[in-house]
Image (spheres, rainbow, N blue to C red):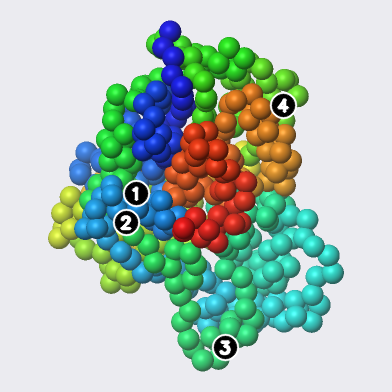
Amino acid sequence: MQSVKYLIIGAGVTGLGAAHRLKELGERSFLVVEGQDYAGGLATTFTDEQGFLWDIGGHVQFSHYTYFDDLMRATLGEDGWLHHQRESWVWLMERFVPYPFQNNLRYLPKEAQWACVQGLLQLLKNPPKQAPRNFGEWVTQSFGEGLAQLFMRPYNFKVWAHPLEMMNYQWIGERVAMVDVERALGNIYEERDDVSWGPNSTFQFPRTGGTGSIWRRVYERIGGEFFRLKTRTVRIDAEAKVVYFADGEPVRYEHLLSTMPLNLLAQQVEQTPQSLRDLAKNLRYSSTNVVGLGLHGSTPAHLKTKCWLYFPQNDSPFYRATIFSNYSPYNVPDAQRYWSLMTETSESAFKPVRQDTLIESTIQGAINSRLIESREQIASIWSYRAEYGYPTPSVERDAVLGALLPFFDALGVYSRGRFGAWKYEISNQDHSLMLGVEWVNRMVLGVPELTLRYPNIANTGAGRV
């Protein structure tokens, strides 16, 4: 039986971050096991038969950590990146409205403008008397009834695939642009555009190879000899410190990092009591369906500078579309002859998706929302379904994590990563990498983990030291 000091389950961004840091610190007794035949997880890029590149959704690069920035430069070099000014829009009422939506109400018909303004004024006249109990109440209390009904409620249901009343609002932080009533009204009166809000108002993207090129390079920097791909975990004996796999010999470890979804980990660890197995079933998530359309011709004039677009209405199944060829001309086989569009549609038991009609409804949605003119433009169609797309910050999430994570930590089974920690607010690429890096720093150097324990502090950029 093989024995290692550090065993890492999963070669996604968190597992790669942990392995990179171990090697950086001079550790050599470690192994990363991965069920797929590639490293990168949800940050993988695929190339279809026609030569179009596709990410698993609209990934962009921005960071809260100096360590992450340094690794990105070392991985692709200074010239390996393209830098973009974020330009995102909302498709609503037969028009594109700049995002943040609430700061650009002047684009709406007068009646819709007034409904949104009325809701904001009502909030000023009658502020909420008690704290919201869930995300749905938070939306209404923060944006007013007009904005909530027109954009925030329908859009967020399309994103999260869960009723808003089932979600908490503690995750929001820098994720949602808040309403400044004076600013919103001033923009209407002065007919002023108000765009490029947020932590990713500027972002970078690999010049070639898509997002996956970053993590392929990190994998190569670590060395393939530290990985066992196509190795699926089936059982963990935390007392004996042995992990068993569907194929291949088991591995004995001293320290274990798991990046598999926490609800699956609870079922695989033999020592998990039934009460915690049942509790883990309360962790909610949505699946992500990505449909990529490779298109003949050049990007339409009205899309040439746009990065991604939001779709709250029911005239399309997708909640977001990315003009993927705008991120890099190398995302298409020939930028003089093609451009590309990538859509994301969420799925859950509360929002089922018909797989047999999804591509057709996506194409029709792209026509309905003036992204493409006709089916004749389509040169290539690519699709991918990620069962685990987004960890849902449900109202019960924090209580579940408060029971599960300390239990597994005490067993010496450390669950980290996008679905290992199950915290949406720290699930970007930079967060995910640092969850692995900081776990290693804790194990090897005795340094406390910042990102997992204090997401709000991490998101202030405290890691830029």
User: Is the C-beta separation of discs 4 and 3 under 8 Å?
Assistant: no
Residue in the foreground of this view, choosing between 75 and 465:
465
User: Is the C-beta separation of discs 2 and 3 under 8 Å?
Assistant: no
* Mark 1–mark 4 distance (CA, rounded to whole Å): 37 Å
Quadrant (top left, top right, bottom left, bottom right) of the N terminus: top left
Residue in the foreground of this view, choosing between 234 and 409:
409
For label 1, the residue is 71
* Mark 2–mark 4 distance (CA, rounded to whole Å): 41 Å
Place of residue 289 in the rendered image (x, y in percent of width and height, measured from the top left): 45, 43
Task: Please give left or right for residue 148 compared with residue 230 in the image.
Answer: right
For label 3, the residue is 186
Number of residues whose C-alpha sits closer than 10 Å to that of mark 1, classed few (under 14), some (14–19) or many (20 or more): some
* Mark 3–mark 1 distance (CA, rounded to whole Å): 42 Å
> Which numbered disc, 2 or 3, marks the residue that appears first in the sequence?
3
* Mark 2–mark 3 distance (CA, rounded to whole Å): 34 Å
Tell me which residue sits at (40%, 51%) in the image.
Answer: 68
> Which numbered disc, 3 or 1, marks the residue that appears first in the sequence?
1
Q: Can the viewer see residue 422?
A: yes
Place of residue 323 in the rendered image (x, y in percent of width and height, measured from the top left): 34, 59
Q: Nearer the viewer, mark 2 or mark 3?
A: 2
